[in-house]
Amino acid sequence: MARLFSSCGGPVPVPAAHDRNGSIKQASCRASLPRWPEVSPVIRRIGSGPRLSAATVHGGLVYVSGQAPDDLGVGVVEQAAQVLAKIDAILAEAGTDKSRILSAMVWLPAIGDFAAFNTVWDAWAPAGAAPARACVESRLADPAIRVEIGCVAALPDA
């Protein structure tokens, strides 16, 4: 069996294939690539307003916009619980849940709240399903907001 080199750069084992001069023929890159599933062109929006949606669903993924608490008169622990409950509801409406979160972005206006926030996060996040996560200190839209969270989750396989 001869080894051909595809235009993709790697060897492709195929039966001996030479041109009339005895040179090795190059295999087609298209023949060696896997076929990807078709992605629906439909974009579904959840909780849409004039400026943003609470989430958009496309290509098997749910993109949850930054969620802030509704009750700003409480501390970071209570606000985190509110935000995570909102994310649970949005994911449920999209047809998935927190066990399928791929990545999360957490914004805290005071990084000193990091440990307190993590107690709520750790109780909420499913064991064995921790997403990629970043937590940064950032000024938020209202000084009373102690936490904001956005995430991306996968839909269950159809």
Image (tube, grey):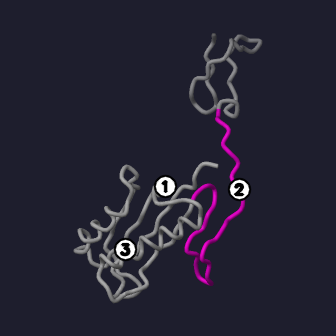
Q: Nearer the viewer, mark 3 or mark 1?
A: 3
Q: Amino acid at mark 2?
A: Ser
Q: Which residues are magenta?
A: 33-61
Mark 3 surroundings within 10 Å by alpha-carbon count, few (fewer than 14), some (14 through 19), many (20 or more): some
Instruction: Tell me which numbered mark, 3 or 1, is placed earlier along the sequence.
Output: 3
Q: CA distance from mark 1 to mark 2?
A: 20 Å
Q: Which residue lies at the image location 71% right of the left edge and 62% below the top edge? A: 42
Q: Which residue lies at the image location 56% right of the left edge and 27% below the top edge? A: 10
Residue 28 lies, in percent from the top left, at 70, 29
Q: CA distance from mark 3 to mark 1?
A: 19 Å
Q: Nearer the viewer, mark 2 or mark 3?
A: 3
Residue 59 lies, in percent from the top left, at 63, 56
Give the residue at mark 2.
40
Mark 2 surroundings within 10 Å by alpha-carbon count, few (fewer than 14), some (14 through 19), many (20 or more): few
Query: For residue 5, what is the image quadrant?
Result: top right
Q: Is residue 57 left or right of residue 20?
A: left
Q: Determine the residue located farthest toward the right in the rendered image.
A: 20
Q: Amino acid at mark 1?
A: Arg
Give the residue at mark 3.
81
Q: Is residue 54 magenta?
A: yes
Q: Is residue 45 magenta?
A: yes
Label 2–label 3 contact, CB within 8 A: no
Give the residue at mark 1.
100
